[in-house]
Amino acid sequence: MSDNAISVAGAVARNANNIGLPEKLVQDGLLDETAMADAQRGAKEARQNLVTYLVNKNIVDAREIAITAAAMFGVPLLDLDAIQVDLDTVKLVSEKLLHKHRVMPLMKRGRRLFVAISDPTNLHGIDEIRFSTSMNVEPVVVEEDKLQKVLGKAMEQVDTSMPAMAEDDFDLENLEVTGGEEEVEAGAGRDDVEDAPIVRFVNKVMLDAIKKGASDIHFEPYEKTYRVRQRVDGVLKEVAVPPVQLAMKISARIKVMARLDIAERRIPQDGRIKMRLSKNRSIDFRVSTCPTLFGEKTVMRILDPSSAQLGIDALGYEPFQKELYLKNLKRPQGMILVTGPTGSGKTVSLYTGLNILNVEDTNISTAEDPAEIILPGVNQVNVNAKVGLTFASALRAFLRQDPDVVMVGEIRDLETAEIAIKAAQTGHLVLSTLHTNDAPQTLTRLIDMGVKPYAIATSVSLIIAQRLARRLCSHCKVTLDIPNEALLKEGFRPEDVAAGIKLHGPKGCGNCTDGYKGRVGIYQVMPVTETIGRIIMEGGNAISINDQAKKEQVWDLRTAGLNKVKDGLTSLEEVNSVTIE
C-alpha cells in the first residue's frame, strides 16, 4: 500500500476509536444529529456512500465535506476545475470500478497512480484499484459534485475513443477457470481464496501474461517485498509488486485454482489450471509451488495449445532443414532426437511433428514429465517415479499396445535409451529429446550412457539441435553500420560481406519489449548418414562427426544463427548469446 493510502488507513483506524466523518460533520455544525441519522439510513436504502447521498440531497455542501475530510484524514485537497483530465490515465482503471467506487484517476508518476476520491474512508475502493492496476494508489480528496461531473464527461470521451471490445478482452470476475472452492480445506479462511481483489489480481496477471505471450509467471515472496515477474521472449520482467502481507492470500488463491492442498506449505506441490477465454480457446497453466524462507514461491508455466498448431512453417526452419524433418517423419521406423537446453523450444518442435503424424490410421503414444499440451488423438502418459511409472516402464507398456509412433519426453538413462532404440529398430518411429549442446554431441552422449555404437548408428535417423533467439521488432529495428572486418571475424561468409549485407539491431517502441517481439528458432538438422554411422561405430568423437557433417553441408547452430541475422530476423547480439562458436 502506498504511503498516503497507509496514512488514510491509519487515520481511519485512529478515528474509529475517537470520531468518524459523520460525527465530525455534526461536530462542525454542518448538520444536526437527527439529520445525520436520517441521512445514514437514506444512504443505506439508496445503496450510496454517505458523502454522495449528502451532496445529491443538498444536505451538506460538497466543498465543506471535502475540506473536513481532507483535514481529518491528512489527505491532499484538490480542485478538479484546475486540472485537465488525462484520458490515457483514466483508461488504466475499468469503467466498472470507476462507477462502483466513484473515483477518478488523475495522473501517473512511475508506479504511482493519483486518484481523486470524495470519501477517503473508502479503503476497499483504493485496494481494488491498486490490485487491478498493479500500481501504488495515492488518494486525493475532491468535491463530490465536481467529481460526478468530471467522471461523467471523462467516461463519455473514453467511450468514443476506445475501440470495440476485442475477443481477448475478458471479464476479470467471471472467467471460467477449472478448480473449485469446494476443494478448499482447513488452513485458509474463505477470505483468503474468495477476496474479490485477490481473485481479480491473479486473473489479471494471468491474462496479461497471455496477451504478452509470456511463457512463465513467477510469484516470489521475500522478507520485506513481494514481486510478480513474467518471462517474455526468454527474459524475466517485473510486472507487479503487491504488498508482502498478501503473499499467503495470493498463494492460497492460486492453489485453489490448481486444486492443490492449501493447508500444506512445507513441501512442493504441482497442479494444473485451465482458463477458458472463449468458446474456442482455452489456456493451460502448469503450476508449481516451492517453500522458501519467506513463503511459497509459485511458478506458472503457460501452455497454449495453439502453439502446437502453428505448423512447421512457423517454426523458422530453413527450407532444406524442413524438408529433412518432414522426410524423416514419414519413415516407418527410426529415431528422431531433438536436443538443446531447457527453454529452447524442443517441446514445440516435437508436438509439431506429432501433429503432422496424428491421423486416424496412426497409433501415437507419449510418455512425458509432465504432458505440457493436451493433443486430442494422442495417448499421453505422465510419468510418476513415486509409483514406478518411469519413462522406461511406460515405453515397455507402449510396445505391448501396437504403437506406430512413440514419443519419450526425455532420454535420461541407459534403460530408457536402450528400450527406445529397440523400439526404433523394430518397426516404430520414436521421437525424444536430450540435453546436449549440438547434434554431434548427442551421438557421443548416447555412447557415454552405455548405448552400443552399432545400435546408435542403425537406429538414430535424424538429430535436431535448436535454440530460440528473440526476434527483432519489425516496427522499430534499426540498420547498423558494422565494419567488414568485424563481420568476417563474427563468421559471416566473405561473399556475403562483399555483397554488402546489412545488419539490424533493436531500438524499442510501443509494439515490443526492448526492441524485440517474439522469438525465432535457430536449428542444426543433421541426418545420420552411412558415413556418420561408420564414424560412430569406429569410435569417432563429436569433433570428427562435426567435421563430416560440415562436409555434408549440414549447418551448425552458428551458421544458422548468422543466416537469421543476415535476413534481418534477429540481432548479432542475440545470436552470440544463444550459440556456441
Image (cartoon, grey):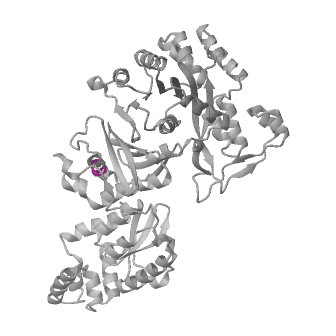
Tell which residue pokes out farthest to the bottom in this image: 58
Give coordinates of residue 519: x percent, y percent. 58, 44
| Residue 501, quarter of the rendered image | top right
Q: Is residue 250 magenta?
A: yes
Tell which residue pokes out farthest to the right in this image: 498
The region drawn magenta spans 249-253
Considering the image in quadrants, where does the N terminus appear? bottom left
Most foreground residue, 497 or 205: 497
Indicate whether 571 appears above or below 99: above
Indicate left or right for 121 with 370 as reference: left
| Residue 221 seen in this snapshot | no
Residue at 38% across, 62% down: 132
| Residue 385, quarter of the rendered image | top left
Give coordinates of residue 175: x percent, y percent. 33, 59
Q: Is residue 373 magenta?
A: no
Most foreground residue, 129 or 222: 129
